[in-house]
Image (cartoon, rainbow, N blue to C red):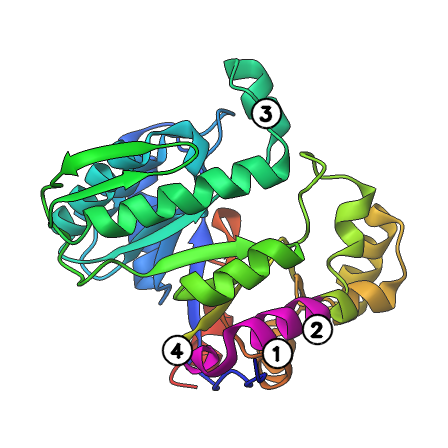
Amino acid sequence: MTSVKPIIRPFRFGIQASKAGSRKEWVEIAKTAEDNGFSTLTMPDHFTDQLAPVPALMSAADATSILRIGALVWDNDYKHPVVLAKELATMDLLSDGRLEIGIGAGWMATDYEQSGMVYDKPGVRIDRFLEGLEIIKRAMSGEKFSFTGQHYKITDYISAPLPVQKPCPPVLIGGGGPRVLKLAAQLADIIGINPSMKDGVVNAATITHMTADAVSEKIKIVETAAGTRMQNIELNIRTFLVNIRDSADEAINGTANMFKVAPEMIANSPFALMGPPAKIAEDLLARRERWGLSYIIVGGEDVNSFAPVIKILAGK
């Protein structure tokens, strides 16, 4: 299939938050995100010290008027796809069409170990995720359907309610390895460019997937697999390393020392945003031009410090 470059899309920004000590604190995060120009509030889906994403995201939607919501990402293994599809459609309906469906095959080994779920090999988890995604998409249609796969069997099922966004809320698939990136290129509306999490933990190997060259390779895989479909895909990145301060050198060197890598690697990595807002804005413009990355997600702790960057890039 012929490779097609992504179109240059307007910037969109999100935060990934996970917990709060009270409703008031959680609502304040959501309102601040909306007021500061963020498009989306996302959450992880783990069994660690975090709020449960479905009720927490619905609470955030209720407290705001235009802020979009979604998981980054729901683990297909944690809920039967019929159950998740019903919850997702309900969230889209009750938020007036503000849901994004971030979904994946699952990666964090400790979630499975602590819960007693079987931690299958990546290929099995990916196969099951593909079946789950197909079921979710078909459920969103509201039409009766049956499905028989290796992992799920659905018989004469009609799902309700239906989502506001037709035929289905935007689907985000994040990928770090070739197989998932190729599948995302064929199935997703939004593709998250991720480090590889095949080991089930964040380790020294993870950082090797965060270099500029590694990102170029990942996006080339997506472009080749997507072909002409690339024009309809939004490219996303969760920037894990954000340090907004007057001295870019101090931020870069401090982060490089922490991870025991060369400063140049941090300076050039699309997963890192280092320095004052004006420099970060310039870096984001250059990265969008080079890679097509336009949907940028930072941490919940960056909800205020990152606001000046959004103002600089507003409308660009």
Question: What residue is rendered at 50% in x and 67% in y?
Answer: 185
Three-letter code, disc 1: Trp
Which mark identifies residue 232? 4
Q: Could you tell which of marks 4 and 1 lies nearer the N-terminus? A: 4
Q: Nearer the viewer, mark 3 or mark 2?
A: 3
Q: Could you tell which of marks 4 and 3 lies nearer the N-terminus? A: 3
Q: Quadrant of residue 311?
A: bottom left
Considering only vertical position in the picture, is 198 above or below 33?
A: above
The image shows residue 83 at horizontal and vertical percentages of 25, 32
| Residue ID for mark 3 | 119
Residue 203 can be seen, yes or no = yes
Foreground pick, 4 / 93: 4
Question: What residue is rendered at 60% in x and 76% in y?
Answer: 224
The residue stretch that appears in magenta: 215-231
Q: Could you tell which of marks 2 and 1 lies nearer the N-terminus? A: 2
| Residue ID for mark 1 | 291
Question: What residue is rendered at 54% in x and 36% in y?
Answer: 125
Considering only vertical position in the picture, is 146 above or below 187?
A: above
The image shows residue 239 at horizontal and vertical percentages of 60, 58
Q: Could you tell which of marks 1 and 3 lies nearer the N-terminus? A: 3
Classify 10 Å Cα crowding around label 1: few (below 14), some (14-19), many (20 and above).
Answer: some
The image shows residue 148 at horizontal and vertical percentages of 32, 37
Q: Quadrant of residue 156?
A: top left
